[in-house]
């Protein structure tokens, strides 16, 4: 077999290694194959040599399996993490509880929601009551600026009409159907409902 030409190697049968690709300074690809005839070969494995280190190239099945496994692992870990945030309560059903959301809420300065201190009805009612009290009990002192000494105010008391006159005035609007109701009448009070 010695001193034969390279064409005689193609006539031989068995396992052989051939140089498939070469990039001279750094990369060489070598294939291990089974030659059955001059035209028919079965490849077993490919090797590549990079900077003098030999690595075996994975076959197509191994590459597809590895890629599929890494993709499935990513999807599985995403589902596991999503399931860790899911909570179930019989009365509420499923809810989501995020850990990083809690941390963000803890780190944020707590800004209290500005709640309206009273409703329109309450404000109107209080204003009416204050005006009523002011007319019944006028202030006896007046303070022009905060921190200054209060100045006494002269109070002029108006004599109240006799009770009979007031009763007659109240009866007159009842007889007249077109008379409007007095504007200073306070709105009805809210009462707690008894159960």
Image (tube, grey):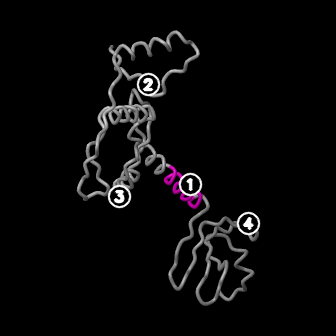
Percent x, y of residue 120: 45, 35
**Mark 3 or mark 1: which comes first in sequence?**
1
Mark 3–mark 2 Cα distance, whole angstroms, equals 52 Å
**Mark 3 or mark 4: which comes first in sequence?**
4
Q: Nearer the viewer, mark 2 or mark 4?
A: 2
Q: Which mark is residue 107?
A: 3
Secondary structure of the residue carrying numbered label 4: loop
Mark 3–mark 4 Cα distance, whole angstroms, equals 71 Å
Mark 1–mark 2 Cα distance, whole angstroms, equals 81 Å
Secondary structure of the residue carrying numbered label 3: helix
Considering every residue shown, the one lying at the far top of the view is: 175
Mark 3–mark 1 Cα distance, whole angstroms, equals 40 Å
Q: Nearer the viewer, mark 3 or mark 4?
A: 3
Residue corresponding to mark 4: 40
Q: Main secondary structure of the magenta part?
A: helix
Pick the front one: 117 or 13: 117
Considering every residue shown, the one lying at the far left of the view is: 149
Total of numbered circles in the picture? Answer: 4
Residue corresponding to mark 1: 68
Q: Quadrant of residue 97?
A: top left
Q: Nearer the viewer, mark 3 or mark 1?
A: 3
Tag 3 and tag 2, C-beta contact below 8 Å:
no
Which residue is depicted at the point 44% across and 25% down?
185
Residue 41 located within the stretch drawn in magenta: no
Residue corresponding to mark 2: 185
Percent x, y of residue 32: 61, 71
Quadrant of the image containing the C terminus: top left
Say left or right for 115 vs 74.
left
**Mark 3 or mark 2: which comes first in sequence?**
3
- Write the start and end of the magenta stretch as one range: 62-75
Secondary structure of the residue carrying numbered label 1: helix
Q: Is residue 143 above or below residue 91?
A: below
């Amino acid at each position: 077999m010695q001193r034969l030409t390279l064409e005689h190697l193609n006539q031989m049968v068995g396992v052989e290694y051939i140089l498939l690709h070469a990039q001279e300074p750094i990369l060489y690809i070598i294939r291990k194959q089974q030659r059955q005839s001059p035209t028919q070969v079965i490849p077993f494995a490919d090797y590549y040599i990079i900077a003098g280190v030999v690595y075996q190239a994975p076959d197509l099945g191994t590459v597809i399996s590895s890629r599929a496994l890494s993709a499935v692992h990513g999807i599985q870990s995403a589902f596991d993490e999503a399931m860790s945030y899911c909570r179930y309560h019989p009365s509420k059903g499923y809810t989501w509880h995020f850990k990083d959301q809690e941390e963000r809420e803890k780190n944020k300065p707590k800004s209290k929601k500005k709640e309206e201190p009273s409703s329109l009805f309450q404000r109107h009612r209080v204003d009416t009551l204050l005006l009523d009290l002011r007319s019944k009990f006028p202030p006896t002192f007046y303070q022009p600026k905060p921190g200054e000494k209060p100045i006494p105010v002269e109070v002029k008391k108006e004599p109240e009409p006799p009770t009979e006159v007031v009763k007659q005035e109240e009866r007159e609007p009842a007889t007249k159907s077109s008379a409007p109701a007095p504007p200073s009448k306070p709105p009805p009070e809210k009462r707690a409902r008894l159960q």
